[in-house]
Image: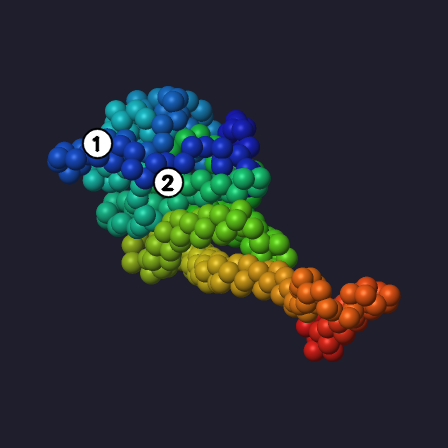
Amino acid sequence: MGNRSKSPAPAATDKASKPRANSRGRVSAKKGLPPGTLVHIGKQSGEKVRISVMSYDEDHYRADELVTPDRIPAYRDGAARTWINIDGLDDVQVIEQLGKIFGLHPLVLEDILNTHQRPKFEDHDDYLFIVIRMLSLDAKTYEIASEQLSLIVGPNYLLTFQEVPGDDFDGVRQRLEIGKERMRKGGPDYLAYALIDTVVDNYFVILEKLSERIEMLEEELVSKPSIETLRVIHRLKRDIVFLRRSIWPLREVANRLTLGDTPLIKPSTIPYFRDVYDHAIHVIDTMETFRDIVSGMLDIYLSSVSNRLNEVMKVLTIIATIFIPLTFLSGWYGMNFKDMPELSWRWGYPMVICIALAVAVGLLLLFRKKKWL
């Protein structure tokens, strides 16, 4: 009965390869349908729905893969605590069958299948419904991917619905398997905390990567800004708006979890949710700081481009200023007058060259003295 076998999904790379949900794709499929109608709106995994079950208590642990829905009632009615994870939402009938087994409201099932939900918390007396966003950042392309994670916290069970296979919860599974710390002793509320805490910790990984990118972009802005730099700034602004929309509502969710106004969250678990709340506030504050920095980057870009243009104009102005008197001299002695004494003077030509050089050197020294060079 080992830990659930699943391909690892590092926070910064693997999950970013998943397709990002199209904010306009298939949302219109629900137009005109009554509330509670189950239609999957979101990423299509192209695979069958995978159900895995982990049942545990202080002394025992068991993990089963590829469980069929008809076997779920046996886990639900057992004495052990149960974590049921569903990967993939393509098969609406399976989700509807699970909803009937656990007595989930049709509107809850509708929100699970509509994966464009904002983070939220709902108390349905017999169970808690929590929605958060799992985010990942590709370390090479800096592409941000978002996936909805829906949690149903019951008296002795936890349901988790993921859009596609692959997550960052292998550490939680290992802690369950070896019985580390409070994992075996805690109930479904503590397991829900562990999963939410893992998701929030991954936000810090994304923010660290964005911080490195912002620092490199700031150096580029000062040294050699280009049109590509401007494109990167606009893309970064868009990504931060996307992050803000995905993370900001988590503050309210974490705050609701710390109130302790439901018996499904034990008083001993509330301090852990307070820690998640503090982390969420930290993430939001950091994200707001990044937004202010990126908003000011456009001004830095315009200032850098203006400074470079000023430097070019200064050089051209100096060159033009030097050649103005030289042009005057050449024009003066280029006039077609027969009686010009200098034209018949033996040293006239060398004298004009010396005067031109003296004027040029004199102007350069003047510019140097004025600190224009």
| Residue at the spot 37% in from the left edge and 46% down from the top edge | 132
Front one among 222 and 270: 222
Front one among 188 and 30: 30
Please state the horizontal and vertical placement of residue 366, each as a whole percent of the image: 73, 76
Picture quarter containing residue 101? Answer: top left
Residue 154 vertical position relative to residue 84 in the rendered view, above or below: below
Please state the horizontal and vertical placement of residue 72, each as a whole percent of the image: 33, 27
| Residue at the spot 48% in from the left edge and 59% down from the top edge | 298
* Three-letter code for the amino acid on which mark 1 is drawn: Ala
Front one among 316 and 262: 316
Q: Quadrant of the C terminus?
A: bottom right
Tell me, yes or no, if residue 241 can be seen here: yes
* Three-letter code for the amino acid on which mark 2 is drawn: Gln
Q: Secondary structure at mark 2?
A: strand
**Structural distance between the alpha carbons of marks 1 and 2:** 19 Å
Q: How many marks?
A: 2
| Residue at the spot 29% in from the left edge and 54% down from the top edge | 262
Q: Please state if 127 lies on the left or on the right of 61 as rendered.
A: left
Q: Which residue position holds label 2? A: 148
Q: Which residue position holds label 1? A: 29
Please state the horizontal and vertical placement of residue 3, each as a whole percent of the image: 53, 31
Q: Secondary structure at mark 1?
A: helix
Q: Decide: few, some or many residues near mark 1? Use Cα within 10 Å; few <14, some 14-19, many ≥20.
A: few
